[in-house]
Amino acid sequence: MPSNATPSLSPTAIAQLKDQVKQWAKELGFQDCGIASTDLGQHKSHLANWLDAGYHGELEYMSRHGTKRSNPAELVPGTVRVISLRMDYWPESAAAAEQILGADQKAYVSRYTLGRDYHKLIRKRLAKLGQKLTEAVANSNYRVFVDSAPVLERGLAELAGLGWIGKNTMLIHPQAGSYFFLAELFTDIPLPVDQPFSSKHCGSCRRCLDLCPTQAFVGPHLLDARRCISYLTIELKGSIPEELRPLIGNRVFGCDDCQLVCPWNKFTRPTTEQDFSPRHQLDRQEMIALFAWTEEEFLQRTEGSAIRRTGYAGWLRNLAVALGNATPSEAVIRALQSRADHPSVIVREHVTWALVQLKRHPLYRDRIV
Ligand code: SF4
């Protein structure tokens, strides 16, 4: 966005434009829209402290951009407002999350990634919103973001009144829970800002902190990403620390536990976007079936899906851990053995671990003859 002079509009025109922006956002399929200034206030120091403590692990991109992440006007010169948008993703047709987490042979895939990758869809809608703004205010400029740049999206959304950041670090809306994507449009139009929530509404609750399978929360609002299952199964490229593997259970891509236990998610609103519906039955697949996918099948079935991010070896690594956490059976052991000579050292290492893990299971002798 070139840093032109800030467009000037009368107070009435600019107030009307704000209402229009919210209406356009709704028409484009966003469930909420709020406007904040570029001053991230306390979120800046929270980010700096989190990075200093090293809780970001290998999320090197979190620290790479210096102060740009906490200063939108530095990232995009000329920016004076950030429009934050919410799009709900909970797929109503998916198998119940708790049921899959409790099913020994099933693979759990985080609910946000059962369908098509959200980036493309949201970016297209954002571009349409930006286009409308440009048509409404000549010479105005905008840039859109969906996880694509160093943007402190939850802090900006909290300031824009889209919810509060819960102790689980997710943005929570009292009438919609936390199962939604966030996106941002940076603009040089000085739209009136929205009011943030006057307080956070977690109260004395600490279910997310206590029930996290890997105890990844160092304290309220403080996540040690290095222990987070989403990080371990998606972001981490190498070997998963052995002491954490048994705690991962059957979660093969991401984890929703800190949201599943959150009482505010009883207000979840299912998505109306067809793209977010489960594909290839990823909401209920058997681990063995997924582990049998060839690389070609993996590439074909994860086309247009965020799951591609792990790569094939990462996918097999995650599944090997999950199989190692299952109840031993001839079928599980045969599946693991079929990958014992896999070209990837990471896959082989996790397969070996899983086979040893199964042998230690109290039911191993009963189940395996
Ligand atoms: S589970 Fe409780 S403490 Fe955690 S985010 Fe939800 S309301 Fe807040």
Image (cartoon, grey):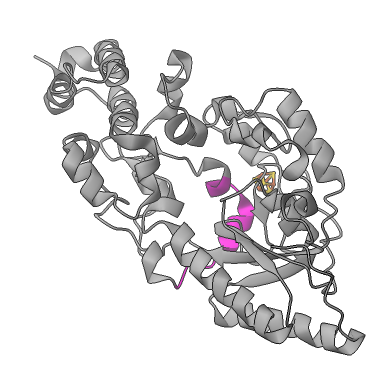
Identify the image quadrant of the N terminus.
bottom right
The residue lying at 48 percent from left, 33 percent from top is 235
User: Measuring 72% from the left and 29% from the top, which residue is drawn there?
Assistant: 51
Q: Residue at x 38, y 36 (%)?
A: 310
Q: Is residue 99 left or right of residue 271?
A: left
Can you say which quadrant of the picture contains the C terminus? top left
Q: Position of residue 348 (x, y in %)?
A: 25, 16
Residue 112 visible in the current orientation = yes
Give above or below for 123 relative to 230.
below
- Position above or below: 263 against 64: below
Count of labels in the image: 0
Residue 307, horizontal then vertical, whole percent: 37, 45
At x 42%, y 21%, the residue is 238
| Position of residue 221 in the picture relative to residue 192 (left or right) | left
Q: Quadrant of residue 351?
A: top left
Front-most of 102 and 125? Answer: 125
Quarter of the view holding residue 340: top left
Q: Where is residue 180 shown, x and y percent of the image?
A: 56, 59
Left or right side of 39 for 63: left
Q: Does residue 270 appear in the picture of this structure?
A: no
Residue range corresponding to the magenta coloring: 259-272
Left or right: 25 in relation to 219: left
Q: Nearer the viewer, residue 351 or 96?
A: 351
| Residue 282 magenta | no
Q: Is residue 268 magenta?
A: yes
The quarter of the picture where residue 239 lies is top left
The x and y percentages for residue 251 are 39, 36
